[in-house]
Structures are given as C-alpha cells and as structure tokens.
Image: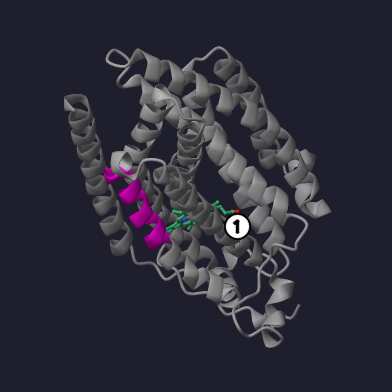
Amino acid sequence: MSPAFIPRPDIIPVAWGWFQFLLLLTFPLHLLAMNAMLGGLALGVYQHFRGGATALRLAHRIAVLLPLTIAFAVNFGVAPLLFSQVLYGHFFYVSSILMGAFWLAVIPILILAYYGAYLYDFRFAKLGGIGRWLALVVLCMLLVIGYFFSNNMLLMLLTERFAGYFEQMDGTMLASADPTFLPRYLHMMLGALAVGGLFVALTGRYRADRDPELAALARDAGMSTFFWTTVLNTLFGLWFLLAQPREVMLMFMGRNMPATICFTLALLLVVGVLIAAWRRKIWLTIWHTVAIVYLMAFMRAWMRSEYLREVFNLGQLQVVTEYSPMLFFFAVLVFGIGCIVWMLQKTREALAAE
Ligand code: HEM
C-alpha cells in the first residue's frame, strides 16, 4: 500500500517513550475496569436467571456496583485514548473514519447502556423478572461496544485496507473478516469474564459476616468462573498467537528477546494464577492477574509496532520539546488519583453502613 494514504503524524512535545510509558501504565487499568464491568455483569445476569434467594441477592449486589464499574471503565479509557492518539493518531483517525458509522454509534450505545444500568440498579426490586432481561440487553450493548473497539484497534493496523475507503465511503468498513479478529475478540471477552469472576468473588467478601451465604456463592461462582475461563482462554490466546502473521508470531518465539521473555513470564504467571484460583486464594489470584494483564498489554504493544514496521516506527515522530503540558498532566494525575482513593473510601463506608 502506498504510504500516501497514511497522514503525516503530529509533532510531539516530549520523547515518545513518555507517551508509550503512560499508555502502557493506563491501558491495563481500563482493561481491568472494563473486565469487572462486563464480566461482573455477565455473572450477575447468570445468577439473576438462575434464581433463588441467594443468587438474587448476589445479582442485586452486582447491579448496585454496575454504574460504578461503567464509570471506571469509561474514565480509565480516556487516558489511553489520549496517549494512543498522540503516538498512533495518524492510523487511529483513519480507521475511525473507515468505520465511522459504527465508531460514532459507540456513544449512543454507551449512553443507553449506562441508563439501563442505573435503571437495573435503582429499580432492581420493582422490575422483578424484567430486570434480568434489561441486564441482558445492557450486557449485549457492552459486548457490541467491545466488538467495535476490537475492530478499530485491528483496522488501524491493516494499512493496506486504507485505500478501500474509495470503494466504501459510508464508514461501514470493519476488520472482523480478518483471521486474527475472532481470536482477538474472544480472547478479550473471555478475559473479561475471568476477571469479572474475580471481581464478583471480591465483592462477596465485604458482607461476609452479615451474609455468609452470599459471600460463599460469590466466592465459588466467581473463582470457578475465573478458573475455567482462564483454562479456556489459554487455548484462545494460543489461537490468537498462531493466527498472527508469521513475523509477528516469531517475535515471541525468540526473534525479539524482551518480547519472548515477557511471553514466557506471562505463561509462568498463568500457571501460578491457575494454582492460586484452584486453591481459592483471592488476593494471590488478583496480583497474578494484574501482572498478567500488564504483560499482555506489553505484548500487544510489540505486536502493534511489528504490524506497522514497514510504514512507521515511533522513532520517526518529530519532537519539539515543551515540558509544561506533561508536568501539568502529572499534577492532575496525582490529584485525580487522590480523588479516586477518596471516592473509593466513601463508597466502602456507604456500603458498610447500608
Ligand atoms: C464501556 C464500554 C467499553 C468496552 C466494553 C471497551 C472494551 C475495550 C476492548 C475490548 C478493548 C481492546 C480492543 C482490542 O485491542 O482488541 C479496548 C481498548 C481501548 N479502549 Fe475501551 N471499552 C469501552 C469503553 C471505552 C471508552 C469510553 C473509552 C474512551 C474514553 C475507551 C478507550 C479505549 C482505548 C483507548 C483502547 C485502546 C488502547 C490502546 O490503544 O492500546 N474504551 N476497549
């Protein structure tokens, strides 16, 4: 494909490593929050359909937490959105235009899902049996949003498709026919279900003394979901890797040493996390999972640069040094983290006082 279809990148104010560092710091936070939201809701819907007094109480607790997890997923999405735009905007904007009709649809779908989540939470008792259908619709909307994100993140890498704009100018191009799409999306969504299970197991803990039945159900349902979906996801991850173009796959098999070490470490941690989950050690499972999600995000970044290698590398970005926006960003970041810690404390107090 002619590089003429790739716009010129913007000038950046500090070396690209800063933006890559911040992208890789913040993107896993978005993934973890998104997983708690999506996977947690999937478990809630299952419990709601299953019925029974304890299952219903668990579904209610998940419903109460849902607007909170959506807020975290969305807000933790903003930071990586900014950093990937700075580094890869000239690819990301193109793919966003190519699939513009679907990409713009993400906003109304998200707003509707958010409304639905509040309705499910505030009217849980009044809605009765209808509530579970509402929750299922919200879950489907979130799955559709994830589907569009995976499409955009892949389409931006398929630069040979960019010229296709002239045959398809209505913004409906997707990357889902690519052989790597299905394993990518399934790997992401199954990961969400696994982490959602962990999140549910954790939420059960906060009322363990007052409602031991709920705590036991949350732990058993959450941890076994985590365990089995992670076993399955190891296979999906392998499928995802094998579906990659040869050069990308070989990177993790010795051709790029840091990438290979990262992959090996992630595999060892997967063994550790499965043992921890089998033994129902929630915190040990959580720390392993956080480490795995970070390592997978690093691997995803290597993959992206390998996909784009022939047309772009980050070293080509032109720097005109201007430190003040970054310093301001760090100041706001520290303030923001302080606010989040404060909010979490208040939420915990409110939940404990209920
Ligand atoms: C609430 C519903 C959302 C879901 C289910 C969701 C899901 C996902 C998924 C599955 C991916 C990975 C795609 C892939 O690589 O295959 C992703 C990436 C991403 N999401 Fe979200 N997302 C949601 C909302 C948002 C929002 C509202 C934002 C921005 C404000 C956002 C920002 C991002 C960014 C920037 C990436 C890619 C980061 C990178 O370039 O490395 N997400 N999301």
**Could you tell whether 258 is left or right of 115 in the image?**
right
Residue 307 in percent (x, y) is at 70, 60
Say left or right for 84 vs 186: left
Q: Does the magenta-highlighted stretch encompass residue 118? A: yes
Looking at the image, which residue sits at the far right? 246
Give the x, y percent position of residue 85. 48, 66
In the rendered structure, which segment of residues is drawn in magenta?
110-123
Q: Quadrant of residue 309?
A: bottom right
Q: Position of residue 275 (x, y in %)?
A: 61, 16
Nearer the observer, 250 or 107 = 107
Instruction: Give the amino acid at mark 1.
Output: Ser
Which residue corresponds to the image point at 55% horizontal and 58% vertical from the top-left? 144
Looking at the rendering, in which quadrant would you find the C terminus?
A: top left
The residue where tag 1 is placed is 150
SS under mark 1: helix
- From the top left corner, tell me how far across and down residue 67 is, in percent: 33, 46
Q: Relative to the observer, which residue lies in front, 181 or 334?
A: 181
Figure label count: 1
Q: Main secondary structure of the magenta part?
A: helix
Which image quarter holds the N terminus?
A: bottom right
Specify whether residue 191 is painted magenta.
Answer: no
Above or below, comparing residue 317 to residue 204 in the picture: below
The residue carrying mark 1 has its beta carbon less than 8 Å from ligand 1 = yes
Residue at (62, 21) in percent of width and height: 274
- Seen in the picture, residue 258 relative to 134 is either above or below; the reply is above
Classed neighbour count for the residue bearing mark 1: other residues with Cα under 10 Å, few (<14), some (14–19), many (≥20): many
Q: Residue at x 70, y 67 (%)?
A: 158
The residue located at (80%, 45%) in the rendering is 242
Residue 105 can be seen in this image = yes
Closer-to-camera residue (285/323): 285
